[in-house]
Amino acid sequence: MLMETVSRPKRNVASGNASSPVGTRAIETATSWSTEHEYQRDIVEFLAHCWQRNARAIDELTSCKRLSELIVVQSKWAWEAEQDHRTMLGKILLYPWKILFRPGQVH
């Protein structure tokens, strides 16, 4: 015998049925806002970190007395900047996946 499906009356979100279309949209919107907040926070933290790194590099550059010191400071700054940008790019590229493929979401 085939499995029998039992029809149940549909309830709205106010009665606690989170699987209704309205409830699902509300959960998706809340998750999207949370992810957007994370994204904005990470961008602001990244920019603040860049400004601090650049200010530190400028201080070090102005204290250089020889060209060789200047080259060392500049190459250190460039390497750190590249690493920071690579890390941030990895984070930024993950945000769309966090929205599209949330844990527990059925596609």
Image (cartoon, rainbow, N blue to C red):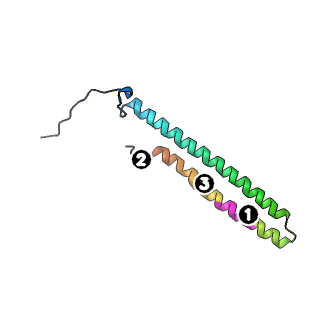
Three-letter amino acid code at the position of disc 1: Trp
Q: Of the two numbered discs 1 and 3 on the same chain, state the one appearing first in sequence.
A: 1
> Is residue 72 or residue 55 the one in the foreground?
55
Quadrant of res 85: bottom right
Q: Position of residue 99 (x, y in %)?
A: 49, 44
Instruction: Give the residue pinned by disc 2.
Output: 103
In the image, taking residue 12 as reference, residue 66 lies left or right, namely right
Q: Of the two numbered discs 2 and 3 on the same chain, state the one appearing first in sequence.
A: 3
Three-letter amino acid code at the position of disc 2: Pro
Three-letter amino acid code at the position of disc 3: Leu
Q: CA–CA distance between discs 1 and 3?
A: 18 Å
The residue positioned 69% from the left and 50% from the top of the image is 47
Instruction: Give the residue pinned by disc 1.
Output: 77
Q: Position of residue 11 (x, y in %)?
A: 32, 27
Estimate how packed mark 3 is, as few (under 14), some (14 to 19) or many (20 or more) residues with alpha carbons within 10 Å: few
Instruction: Give the residue pinned by disc 3.
Output: 89
**Magenta stretch bounds:** 75-83
